[in-house]
Image: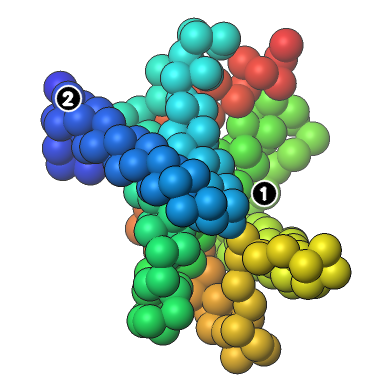
Amino acid sequence: MTSSLLEFSDAFEKRLVRVLQVALAAIVVYGVVRLQFELVLNAGLPLAVTFFPAYLRREYSYTMDAGLVLLLSVAVFLHAIGSLGLYVRYSWYDEITHTVSAVLVAGTGYATLTALERHSSEIDLPPKLRGIFILVFVLAFSVVWEVFEVSAVWLSQLLGVTSPVKVFGIDDIVTDMIFNTVGGLIVAVWGADYFDDIIPFLRRRLRS
């Protein structure tokens, strides 16, 4: 069986997800051994996120497309690996992680909007505005995320602990927003249909 998102078999994509989970678990163990709390957090939370599709399958009988599961896992894995020092060493690495994450956020926004439209006759967004909605959704999420990062750094400094996230100044924030927009454009122009798999599940949750 071939996934609708990537041209790999579902079995192969599931194996890739397992590899990423093992790698994340190894980073968590390394962080515990080295007593690096921020590393444990930066790998532990992404590891937990990779099990979210399994939670949906167990609790709601919804099996997420294997390609989407892999995209989710890759997005959080890239962040965890970045916490090992790649964000600091290579400026382009942050651009990659933000683009990949923005694709996931944009697709989720598109699927949510479509589910709401099919659920309620009062919501009807013209096709020409869908792309604009996706971009606005991504940018709004980006603002929330940047506020979270700045707040986390400020709170960590206040408590005298190492922040789990890093902020490298206003230029970094602007660059993040630019590449978040790139991820949103990818979905708006080419990739929205790949997230259609989520829409029936969201409609069922709205009806319930």
Q: From this view, report whether residue 71 is shown above or below residue 120.
A: below
Q: Position of residue 27 (x, y in %)?
A: 39, 47
157 relative to 55 in the view: left or right: right
Q: What residue type is labelled 1?
A: Leu
Give the quadrant of residue 156.
Answer: bottom right
Q: Position of residue 26 (x, y in %)?
A: 34, 42
Q: Name the residue rendered at 24%, 37% in the picture.
A: 19
Question: Considering depth in this image, is 5 or 128 the residue closer to the camera?
Answer: 5
Give the quadrant of residue 167.
Answer: bottom right
Residue 122 in view: yes
Identify the residue position indicated by label 2 in the image.
Answer: 11
Helix, strand or loop at label 2? It is: helix
Question: Considering depth in this image, is 5 or 156 the residue closer to the camera?
Answer: 156
Q: Position of residue 12 (x, y in %)?
A: 15, 31
Q: Name the residue rendered at 38%, 59% in the picture.
A: 81
Q: Name the residue rendered at 51%, 33% in the picture.
A: 48
Answer few, some or many: residues within 10 Å of disc 2's Cα (few below 14, many 20 plus, some between 14 and 19).
few
In the picture, the quarter occupied by the N terminus is top left
Q: Name the residue rendered at 46%, 38% in the picture.
A: 47
Question: Considering depth in this image, is 192 or 97 the residue closer to the camera?
Answer: 97
Closer to the N terminus: mark 2 or mark 1?
A: 2
Give the quadrant of residue 172.
Answer: bottom right
The label nearer to you, 2 versus 1, is 2
Q: What is the spatial separation of the Cα atoms under label 2 and label 1, in whole angstroms? A: 37 Å
Question: Considering depth in this image, is 132 or 3 the residue closer to the camera?
Answer: 3
Q: By what rule are the colours in the image chosen? A: rainbow
**Label disc, if present, on residue 125 of the rendered structure:** 1
